[in-house]
Image (tube, rainbow, N blue to C red):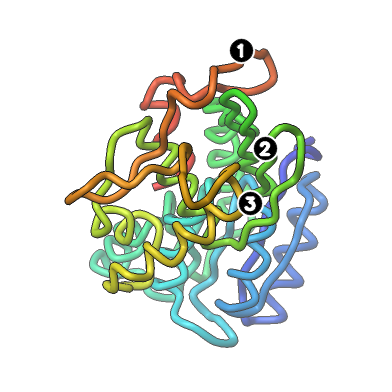
Amino acid sequence: MATSLQIHLISGNPHLRSLLTWHLQQAGYRLSQSTGAEQAKNKLAQNSPHLVILDTELSEGDALELCRWIQQQASSLLLMLSTLGDETDIVSGLQAGADDYLSKPFGMQEFLARVEALTRRQRSSAPPASLQYGDLEVDLIQRRVKLKTIPIELTPQEFSLLYVLVQALGLPLSRADILERAWPNGIDNPRTVDTHILSLRKKLEVDPRQPSLIQTVRNVGYRFNMEVLEPDVGSETVGLDQPASQRSALMA
């Protein structure tokens, strides 16, 4: 039984949603649901499940755009369900970020086998629950941040920005790089980055006017100053010295 694994099902078809939910729960998975893109984004921004099942039949929103958003924002694996089964449609879904693609109609045994294969990948890859470096803890599942054990309230976008900076391991990133990695919706205004950097500094820096954690790199952009914090070593968390091959699966 897979009782410890969380699946989020996104579908605008109530009959399909009910059918899949019943079978997945019978198989031992924990389920949450959304019917459209905005509802899904709100829920996934608060909690990242092990697997997202995305039916392209949504109550509102574009499935491929939502797939790209999930690939950028969440650490979940993604199974796409669609009535479109041509090679070009499958390729489009996989290129948008789906880890597997299943054409409708499908048999329930095949569906459950695909889910099991993906969750087996999730278990074997064993992504860390959090990143810890000194006094800073970034919870990847709950998308929460603590500094010196004090919870820091971040918006979903602030969290994504912080993660991108931390993931760069102290290397400076241009505003264009940050926009591409942290904003999946085609925003191209560099002032957006500056505004969110200012907001992050107010929440994380001892003195936001003289930032030591999130530094400005002249004529380049911003970097996360790894030297400010001494790394902690623990068995329950993975530090920022984790190999890039293991970190890259967490967030694009």
What's the residue type where badge 1 is placed?
Val
User: Element type at marker 2?
Assistant: strand
Q: In 3D space, how far apart are the residues under numbered discs 1 and 2 (Cα atoms)? A: 16 Å
Q: In 3D space, how far apart are the residues under numbered discs 3 and 1 (Cα atoms)? A: 25 Å
State whether residue 160 is above or below residue 134: below
Q: Which residue is mark 2?
A: 147
Residue visible at 71% across and 81% down?
14
What's the residue type where badge 3 is placed?
Ser
Q: How many marks?
A: 3
State whether residue 237 is above or below residue 19: above
Q: Which residue is mark 3?
A: 48
Residue 90 bears which disc, if any?
Answer: none
State whether residue 243 is above or below residue 172: above
Q: Nearer the viewer, residue 215 or 167?
A: 215
What's the residue type where badge 2 is placed?
Leu
Judged by depth in the image, the label closer to the viewer, 2 or 3, is 2
Residue visible at 76% across and 40% down?
150
Residue 233 bears which disc, if any?
Answer: 1
- The reply to whether dot 1 and dot 2 touch (C-beta < 8 Å) is no
